[in-house]
Image: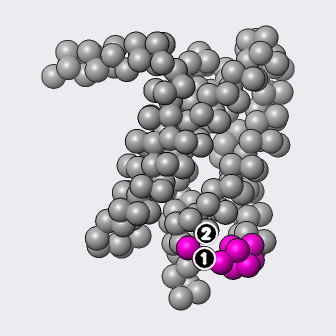
Amino acid sequence: MGSVAKKSLEQYLFQLQKHPLRTKAITAGVLSAVSDIVSQKLSGIQKLQLRRLLLKVIFGAAYLGPLGHYFHMFLDKLFKGKKDTKTVAKKVVLEQVTISPWNNLFFMIFYGLAIEGRPWMHVKSKIKKEYPTVQYTAWTFWPVVGWINHQYLPLELRVVFQSMVAFCWGIYLNLRARSLALTKG
């Protein structure tokens, strides 16, 4: 069994080297799918909601994977690939004041409009009420992830690492969105 896992990892790393954007997009899509399946089950949904699942796959593969790929390349070019403490701190701060707020806002908009099918006025109201809490929570969690990512991982593995952590974050956001919908319904 160990050789199967080793060969699979080697093949994955080969694909990551040969086709980085495609591999990161597929990885983000698959992890978004698994995260959503877990979220649906934990929130008590009996029958898997396939439309929702597909939309989460699209969100991960078409948005999260590619954006992460280009954003991390941009950061590495901007800071010339340095990994000293001061540079890593700058990368983390830049990430937290730019892409973190945007990703959380965009997810809430996407979730409300596309997944829940709510009208814009309802989504806007929900964002006004819940976004500060979501972003505050993100700022207590993601900087540590960003530090580990920028300090210890090579560029080609950063999106993969973030996608694996986002697996858990996605469960948190889904359960939060679901619990807020249930309390209002």
Give the secondary structure at mark 1. loop
Task: State the residue in front, 23 or 43.
Answer: 23
- The question of residue 153 being in magenta is answered with no
Q: Residues within 10 Å of mark 2 (few under 14, many from 20)?
A: many
- The question of residue 119 being in magenta is answered with yes
Location of the N terminus by quadrant is top left
User: Is disc 1 in contact with disc 2, using a CB cutoff of under 8 Å?
Assistant: yes
Residue at image location 53% in from the left, 72% down from the top: 116
Horizontal side of 150 relative to 178 (left or right) equals right
Residue at image location 20% in from the left, 20% down from the top: 4
Horizontal side of 47 relative to 1 (left or right) equals right
Our reading of the magenta stretch's main secondary structure is helix
Q: Amino acid at mark 1?
A: Arg
**Magenta span of residues:** 117-125
Q: Give the image location of residue 63, x and y in percent.
A: 59, 43
**Residue found at the far bottom of this picture:** 185
Q: To which quarter of the image does residue 126 belong? A: bottom right
Q: To which quarter of the image does residue 147 belong? A: top right
Q: CA distance from mark 1 to mark 2?
A: 6 Å
Res. 165 in view: no
Name the residue beneath numbered marker 1. 118
Give the secondary structure at mark 2. helix
Q: Give the image location of residue 86, x and y in percent.
A: 84, 20
Task: State the residue in front, 77 or 4.
Answer: 77
Q: Is residue 99 above or below residue 172?
A: above
Name the residue beneath numbered marker 2. 112
Q: Amino acid at mark 2?
A: Gly
Horizontal side of 53 relative to 75 (left or right) equals left
Q: Residues within 10 Å of mark 1 (few under 14, many from 20)?
A: some
- First reached walking from the N terminus: tag 1 or tag 2: 2
Residue at image location 52% in from the left, 53% down from the top: 170
Residue at image location 80% in from the left, 42% down from the top: 98
